[in-house]
Every structure is written in structure tokens, then in C-alpha cells.
Amino acid sequence: MRLAMAVSIALLMLVHGCGKDPTAPTATDAELIVLRFADTAFAHVEKAGSVWAVRGQERELVLRYENYGSYAGEPYLRFRIPAQALLRDPAGRSYAPGDSVQITVTVDAGGRYLFEFEPSGLAFDPAHPAELTVWYEWADGDLDGDGDEDAVDAELEEGLHVWRRETLGGEWQRLGTVRRKETVELQARVTGFTGFVIATRNAR
């Protein structure tokens, strides 16, 4: 009985906190090295997209490469929304079956792997979270910005995670992230919006 109550309280805290986990590592902008697109690749990616999410229907939002040789049409970001994922709107109202909301994503104009999702405050069911997948094969490999790609950059790549923040200029929180080296992708479960970034902690 007490365990069930504790689980319920924990889930409520996650929902009303838009998925914020008080135990997860946090960092400021200055403490993170943000992955960047290679210049040639960034010129050929979709910079924004949208999808209507509907309670009771599975939907997904995909951003792709455009006019980029054999990679034209290939995705670099996918946001999957399970049928039961929509939980509460930014005002705290619960979604009923058939209710919908338009979700939009905008890519950082400076070429960073930084994605702003709207509407801010939208909450997903922790039992049926949304899923963010990012492929970074065409990222700039010089993560430390010293002009070359070396062992230091490879070590920094090992530390890449998906991070989220609730407000512009706010603190970043690291999400549990699955990294697949063979497909050069990162994947994280999402229970709330707004900003997401692919980054590693600055060791300096």
C-alpha cells in the first residue's frame, strides 16, 4: 500500500514538473560542449517541422536532409508520440481520447544540435513517454574546437547525452540516453517540453 502510494506520488511529481528528475545531473550553458552540424551538412537540413499529436493515435515528427547527395531524404531527428502519450496541456488540463495539439520543433539557427519544442509545458504520460531520436553522423567532429579531430574529441563523444531545459537560459538536465555507435544515434524518453540539446560536459 505504501509502495503504491509512493509510486503514485513520484509519477505525479514527474507529470507536474514536466518530467524533471531532481536526481539527474544538471549543467549551465558554460559547462556543456554542444554538438554542432558540419557546415556543409547544416546547409541541407530541414530547420523546422510540425505534427498534430492526437490522444489515441500514434504520430511522429521527422526532420530530414534535403538535397544532400545520397543522404537526401534521410532523417536526422525523429520524435515519436505513442497513442497514449498525450497527458496534459500547458495549462494542466488532461487530454481526452481524440483531443489534439500541434507540436512544432525549431532547430538552432547557429547550427548546434539544439532543438526547441513547443508548446512549452506540454506533458506526456511517464508510463507512455514520447521518444526523441537524433542521428549525428554529419556532426562536426572537432568537439573541443581546437582545429583538429583527435583522441580528446573521441573521448568527448563518448560522453554525449540528450539534455533538456524548461526555460530559455535555464539550467540543463541530463536525460537517460541510449547511444548506438553503429548507427551514430542517441535516443531518450521525453515526458515534457521545451528545449533539448545534444551535448557533453566540458571537462576543462
Image: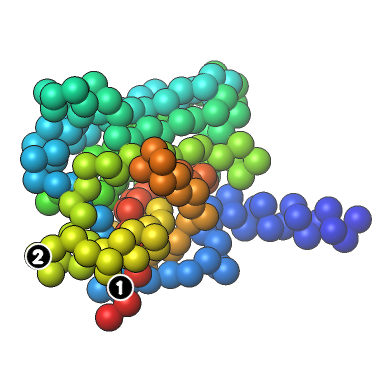
Horizontal side of residue 123 vs 40, given as left or right: right
Count of labels shown?
Answer: 2
Residue 13 in the image: above or below residue 105? below
Q: Residue 67 in the image: state x and y as whole percent.
A: 12, 23
Task: Look at the image and tell me whether residue 181 can be seen.
Answer: yes
Q: Quadrant of the N terminus?
A: bottom right
The residue lying at 78 percent from left, 60 percent from top is 6
Horizontal side of residue 167 vs 122, given as left or right: left
Horizontal side of residue 37 vs 96, given as left or right: left
The residue tagged 1 is: 202
Q: Amino acid at mark 1?
A: Asn
Q: Secondary structure at mark 1?
A: loop
The residue lying at 68 percent from left, 58 percent from top is 10
Front-most of residues 58 and 91:
58
Marker disc for residue 147 = 2
Q: Residue 87 in the image: state x and y as whole percent.
A: 57, 37
Task: Look at the image and tell me whether residue 91 can be seen.
Answer: no
Q: Residue 65 in the image: state x and y as whole percent.
A: 20, 29
Residue 153 in the image: above or below residue 178? below
Q: Amino acid at mark 2?
A: Gly
